[in-house]
Image: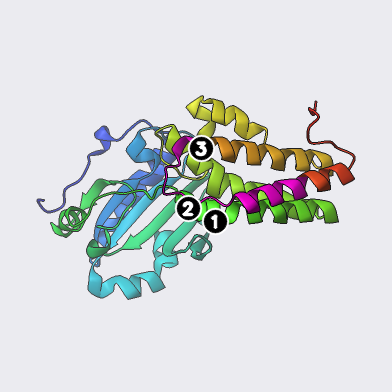
Amino acid sequence: MPAACGLAEHDWPPMPESHRIRLRHVVSCVPRHDELVGLLAGGSFVAGRLDRYSDLDLIVVTAPHAWPGILERRTALAAEWGPLLGAFRGDHVGEPRLLICLYGPLLVHVDLKFLTPDQLGCRVEDPVVLWARDASVASGLAAGRASYPRPDLQWIEDRFWIWVHYAATKIGRGELFEAFGCGAFVRSRVLGPLALDIAGARPDGVRRLEQTGTADADAMRQTVAAYDARDIARAVSARVDLYRSLRDRIADATLERHPEAEAAAVAYLEDVARTLGHDPEEPVA
């Protein structure tokens, strides 16, 4: 790759002016730092579907010798690249190299991930090179290939029925906020990834599941409950039905099922629902 090359602005995908202004400014600022050797864009930029609600997902490629120091002062760098309203590290998503930023006054969410060239090989997508100082960025990308992890059905099956029982205990005890949390977790870690994978989309939680237009998206809506113990029990039952449907479409002979745990957890959920005055066999309006 020749020095100081990248994707020209006229070749960027369509985006809101607020995002264009922010991205243009970052692209102009990054080359001023000798320790930085590249700037890449991922996420919606790669997909070409940036809208007013999109984040800017950027990778700041750092010379290896400077990387520890850059991580230490990344918030200060981000503040140099625009009117930074707030920023924090991505430890909560298991990515301490990430700095999550909010710029304003035209609000734009920008994720800045600071990597060295040799860390580019392990990735979930192929980013677009916006700027590169030298060939190290291309070499780092060439050292690996993009691979988004697919759902591990055995991992899910080993846990799912215990999660069903846990949710039922929270409903029975009246811990409805906790029961809501169980539902969001199962949608994000189990049902969404399986449904998206079957639909041929990237199995990233429940991202853009509504846009798939599949029957699974309709079924997913049934797993969302109102703040009502009976309705939450109904939603857990809907999660069971959807999981069984998804599992049975993709499982092969190697899947070790747990029929005793499945039967016991479902019976427990039905018993809890009956104590709430709702018969799970009876349709809920």
Q: Quote the CA–CA distance across marks 3 and 2.
A: 12 Å
- Tell me if 281 is positioned left or right of 147 in this view: right
Magenta stretch: helix, strand or loop mostly: helix
For marks 3 and 2 on the same chain, the one whose residue lies earlier in the sequence: 2
Question: For this rendering, which residue is in front, 244 or 259?
Answer: 259
Secondary structure state at the residue bearing disc 1: helix
Q: Residue at x 63, y 36 (%)?
A: 241
- Tell me if 228 is positioned left or right of 135 in this view: right
Residue that label 2 marks = 154
Q: Residues within 10 Å of mark 2 (few under 14, many from 20)?
A: some
- The reply to whether residue 228 is in sight is no
Contact check, label 2 and label 1, Cβ < 8 Å: yes
Residue that label 3 marks = 248
Q: In this view, does 152 lie above or below 72?
A: above
Question: For this rendering, which residue is in front, 115 or 260?
Answer: 260
For marks 1 and 3 on the same chain, the one whose residue lies earlier in the sequence: 1
Measured as percent of width and height from the top left, residue 116 is found at: 27, 65
Measured as percent of width and height from the top left, residue 135 is found at: 13, 57
Q: Quote the CA–CA distance across marks 1 and 3.
A: 15 Å
Q: Residue at x 24, y 51 (%)?
A: 145
Q: Which residue is drawn at 31% across and 49% down?
A: 147
Kind of residue indicated by mark 3: Asp
Secondary structure state at the residue bearing disc 3: helix
Residue that label 1 marks = 158
- Tell me if 85 is positioned left or right of 42 in this view: right
Magenta residues span 248-269
